[in-house]
Image: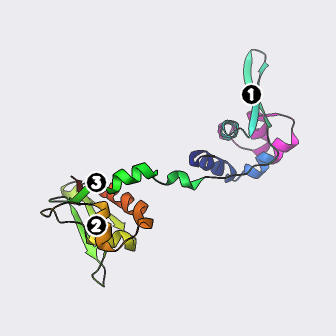
């Protein structure tokens, strides 16, 4: 199950009426959205959407039937139990992508609309405030940094300095390879906000 499917399932299970709906699904051989909605005292669209989500997750099966000339679906349980397992390793950068990312040369962008705040110990950056927009419509986005990210950005070359690649900056900051994913993540964010430039 991927993360989006797990989120959809979690949303279905977290509904106030979910337990009662599943009780109906286990009691009835098949049930329509209108029958379930009337039993639970809810709007048919609310139940229809939930049943369709459960169908798309292959928890329910459905059959099209006709009442006169008007078709509708009857739903029945396809499974006897529901389990959720999400493989979080899919969020990791692949090794080849990581290799190319850590080799890119970067430095702080000239005239970046950002303020770097150093820690009390003055040996890492604790947060960055980024200004977006102009004049009265200007807004601030504050990003709190993990300590490894803060140490990395403390050693980020200034706009007038020679750029360094991510591996070189990590070495200067005393960081090991275990921190690569979170460093690449913050670098990507700051490139997007035009605080860091990629050379």
Residue wearing tag 2:
169
Looking at this view, is 159 or 57 the one in front? Answer: 159
Residue 41 picture quarter:
top right
Q: Which residue is mark 1?
A: 73
Question: Separation of disc 1 and disc 3 at Cα?
Answer: 54 Å
Residue 37 position in % (x across, y down): 74, 40
Report the residue that reaches farthest toward the left.
160
The residue closer to the viewer here, 161 or 6, is 161
Can you tell which of label 1 and label 3 is closer to the viewer?
Answer: 3
User: For mark 3, does the 10 Å Cα neighbourhood hold few (<14), some (14 to 19), or many (20 or more) residues?
Assistant: some
- Residue at 33% of width from left, 71% of height from top? 150
Alpha carbons under labels 2 and 3: distance apart: 11 Å
User: Would you say residue 149 sits in the magenta stretch?
Assistant: no
Residue at the spot 27% in from the left edge and 72% down from the top edge: 154
Q: Secondary structure at mark 1?
A: strand
* Residue extending farthest top: 69
Q: Which residues are magenta?
A: 23-49
Determine which residue is flagged by label 3: 104
């Amino acid at each position: 199950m991927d993360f989006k499917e797990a989120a959809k399932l979690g949303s279905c299970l977290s509904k106030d009426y979910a337990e009662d709906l599943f009780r109906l699904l286990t009691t009835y051989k098949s049930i329509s959205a209108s029958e379930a909605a009337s039993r639970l005292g809810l709007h048919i669209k609310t139940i229809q959407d939930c049943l369709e989500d459960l169908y798309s997750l292959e928890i329910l099966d459905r059959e099209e039937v006709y009442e006169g000339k008007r078709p509708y679906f009857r739903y029945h349980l396809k499974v006897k139990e529901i389990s959720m397992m999400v493989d979080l390793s899919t969020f990791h950068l692949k090794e080849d992508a990581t290799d190319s990312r850590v080799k890119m040369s970067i430095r702080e962008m000239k005239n970046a609309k950002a303020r770097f705040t150093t820690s009390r110990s003055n040996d890492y950056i604790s947060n960055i405030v980024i200004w977006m927009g102009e004049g009265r419509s200007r807004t601030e986005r504050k990003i709190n940094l993990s300590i490894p990210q803060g140490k990395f950005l403390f050693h980020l070359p200034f706009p007038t300095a020679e750029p360094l690649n991510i591996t070189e900056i990590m070495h200067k900051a005393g960081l090991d390879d275990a921190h690569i994913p979170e460093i690449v993540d913050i670098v990507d964010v700051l490139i997007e906000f035009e605080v860091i430039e990629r050379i």
